[in-house]
Amino acid sequence: MARTDFVDDFLKGFTCVIITGASSGIGRVILSRLGKSGTAAAVFNLSRTAPEGVPNSLKFSHLTCDLAQPHEIEKVVGELRKLMPREGRILLVNNSGFGAYGEFPAPDLAHTLRMVDVNMRAVVHLTGLLWPDLKARGGQVATVASLAAYQPTPLMTTYAATKAFALHWSIALDAESRPYGVRCVAICPGPVSTNFSKAAGFTGSTGIGGQTAEACVDEALHAMAKAQPQVITGWKHKLLGWFSARLPKPWAAAIGLRVIRRLRLDRYVKKA
Ligand SMILES: NC(=O)c1ccc[n+]([C@@H]2O[C@H](COP(=O)([O-])OP(=O)(O)OC[C@H]3O[C@@H](n4cnc5c(N)ncnc54)[C@H](OP(=O)(O)O)[C@@H]3O)[C@@H](O)[C@H]2O)c1
């Protein structure tokens, strides 16, 4: 079967798709790919701003939610429960997230704690609230982690650690949830050209080559259709992940620090 048909069939297998952070970048491309798939699912986006240019073919609803706020997650799941179809498989894509660059706790502790909340706490909270539905109806939970999840990464210390959490959490949950017909997939992109670097405090592109969001999503959806527990997108990133995961962790951190310093990323950091 052709790759596109394989992914289309996978996406058509759900009656309800819930995605976080489809207002930008990787999430927005997933939304547009859903639009091309011919799915009849009800599609819900959870983020602070509504996505633009949502494909007309989708039965789409945007539910405003700041995932750093636990009470907003509780509220939005209440709204979801009223709107979502009662039967059929559910696809949850935990995609929202952001990073930061600089010596801990740059740019400041409040920002770092919000990152912990969005990248980790919200993923567990949202998945946990929807877990009874997922177990009863079957489906998939795809969580966007990162290549940074495979090694301790100085100067992106907290971000990389949040993604290591997401990777391990998702893979372990997959082992637990298979008997219920629920599969979990950890998506680990390397650098991807999105608004990520701006949100991480850079003035624009850092010049680090990477994938387009379209190429990243194409690989991610293929891995989701195959229910792979983890996927690193991009062959160079796959190699990097393979090597860095095998180094003793303190070595990986020391080498990482030298490499990142050599990139002189400070040149691109927005001045306060
Ligand atoms: N781009 C990369 O190089 C790269 C590499 C590895 C992993 N990733 C991961 O990929 C995922 C998507 O990032 P991206 O590259 O597509 O970046 P992006 O273009 O900046 O998109 C980030 C998305 O996260 C949402 N978000 C951020 N804070 C939120 C909050 N408090 N509540 C709800 N939603 C929030 C944003 O929506 P609103 O602003 O509308 O709320 C936005 O839709 C993230 O988890 C990121 O860590 C990215």
Image: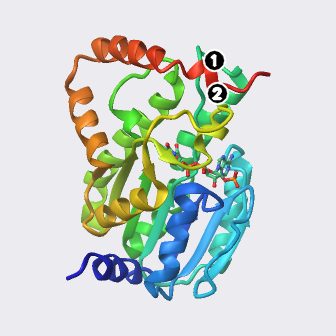
Relative to residue 249, is residue 195 drawn left or right?
right
Q: Residues within 10 Å of mark 2 (few under 14, many from 20)?
A: some
Q: Is residue 133 above or below residue 35?
A: above
Residue 29 image position (x, y, % from top left): 52, 65
| Place of residue 165 in the rendered image (x, y in percent of width and height, measured from the top left) | 42, 36
Residue shown at 40%/46% (left/top)?
Answer: 189
Q: In which quarter of the image is residue 23?
A: bottom right
Residue at the limit of the structure toward the front, as seen here: 207
Q: What element carries label 2?
A: helix
Reading the image, the residue beneath label 1 is 105
Q: Residue at x 48, y 82 (%)?
A: 36
Quadrant where the N terminus is found in the figure: bottom left
Task: Note whether 80 is above or below 76 in the view shown.
Answer: below
The image quarter containing residue 267 is top right
Q: What amino acid does circle 2 point to? A: Thr
Question: Do labels 1 and 2 touch, CB within 8 Å?
Answer: yes
Q: Nearer the viewer, residue 250 or 134?
A: 250
Residue 174 in the figure: left or right of residue 96: left
What is the crowding at mark 1: few (fewer than 14 residues within 10 Å), some, or many (at least 20)? Answer: some
Task: Kindly report the distance in space between the C-alpha atoms of the residues bearing marks 1 and 2.
Answer: 6 Å
Residue 14 percent coordinates (x, y): 43, 80
Q: Nearer the viewer, residue 17 or 88?
A: 17
Sequence order check, earlier mark of 1 and 2: 1
Q: Mark 2 highlights which residue? A: 112
Does any atom of ligand 1 lie closer than 8 Å to the CB of label 2?
Answer: no
